[in-house]
Amino acid sequence: MKNKITTIGNLTIDDIVLCDTAEIYLASIGGNALFSAIGARIWDAAPLIVSRIGKSFPIEFKQQVKVLGINTALIPMACNDIRNWALYEPGGARQFVNHMTSGSHYDMSITAAELPKECWDADGIHVAPMPTDVQYDVLKAIRQLKNKGTVVSWDPHEYYLSQPDFNKMAYEMLEMVDLFLPSKEEVTAMCGNRDIYTCIKEFASRGPTVVAVKMSTDGSIVYDKSSGDFYHVPIINSITKDPTGAGDAYCGGFLNAFIESGDAVLAACSATVSSSYIVEEIGAINKLKADFSTRNFRYERIRYNVKKY
């Protein structure tokens, strides 16, 4: 039976610039809610995207993803969509720059009051990066209304964590989730340049059963609170064409696999497979249409190379 996964976050319109290959791809649909849904869909989950959309969002999107196994619950807004320049510099550095006419994160981040009834019928709910106070209200609503047994994962937004009030709020949010899935940059934003392993243990002590930190090409660090063990899960070598959404896909793959196994390391292996497929295609729809037939082979390769600390 397919796991029902709800992903709550943003949808965006991305203009992708790949400096290494001098390629430009305009008006590519993206966003953390979509990529986390794809990460789960790679493993045959039944995802539901919950998001706001603006007045210029393509009307064909809903049907495009539906035929590929992803449902949507979209709230239309009378404002501009988030539109980014996704700039990938030589050597792998990247930055996202909003268009001058882009809607803001607050414009396009769904509120707790807007969460539709469809999202509660889920085995797992993932809250993707949005403004911290928006995430706080969403997670509070999830905590009150979710079904017993629903697994909740959370990925914060680095930009907002630098604000003291939001940083304090983020620590309170750790009490509301089962899985905390930040990037290394988000860990630094939350606790400065302290030892990352100390920070991870502190996060887990606040509530989450598992903390998995995404380390880009260095793989991920996974902490299982029940055993007190750390693991390093490596990436799998892929031909990278467009890394947009790889971290979000990791989250979707992780949540789906954790629901099935309850094992943090196996979940991270599945999550890493999801990320490996994402980087190999340009644009979210193309990523979703890719051939995932090698997923079990990739999974076993990653699992074989996991290291326990």
Image: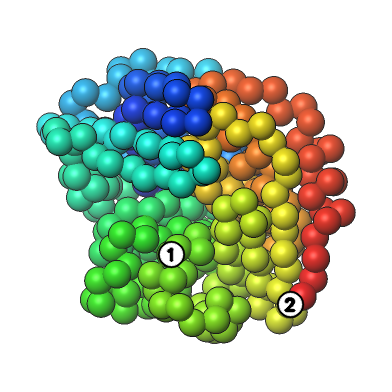
Q: What residue did someone put label 2 on?
A: 229
First of labels 2, 1 by sequence position: 1
Depicted 16 relative to depicted 1: above or below: above
Viewer can see residue 2: no
Q: Nearer the viewer, mark 2 or mark 1?
A: 1
Q: Is mark 2 on a helix, strand or loop?
A: strand
- The 10 Å Cα crowd at callout 1, few under 14, some 14 to 19, many 20 or more, is many
- The image shows residue 263 at horizontal and vertical percentages of 74, 62
Q: Is residue 35 left or right of residue 262?
A: left
Q: Is residue 130 visible?
A: yes
Picture quarter containing residue 189?
bottom left
To which residue does mark 1 refer? Answer: 186
286 to 236, vertically: above or below: above
- Kind of element beneath mark 1: helix
Other-residue count near label 2 (Cα within 10 Å), few / some / many at <14 / 14–19 / ≥20: few
Q: Position of residue 88 (x, y in %)?
A: 43, 38
Taking depth in this image into account, of 14 and 90 the one nearest to the observer is: 90
Residue type pointed to by label 2? Asp
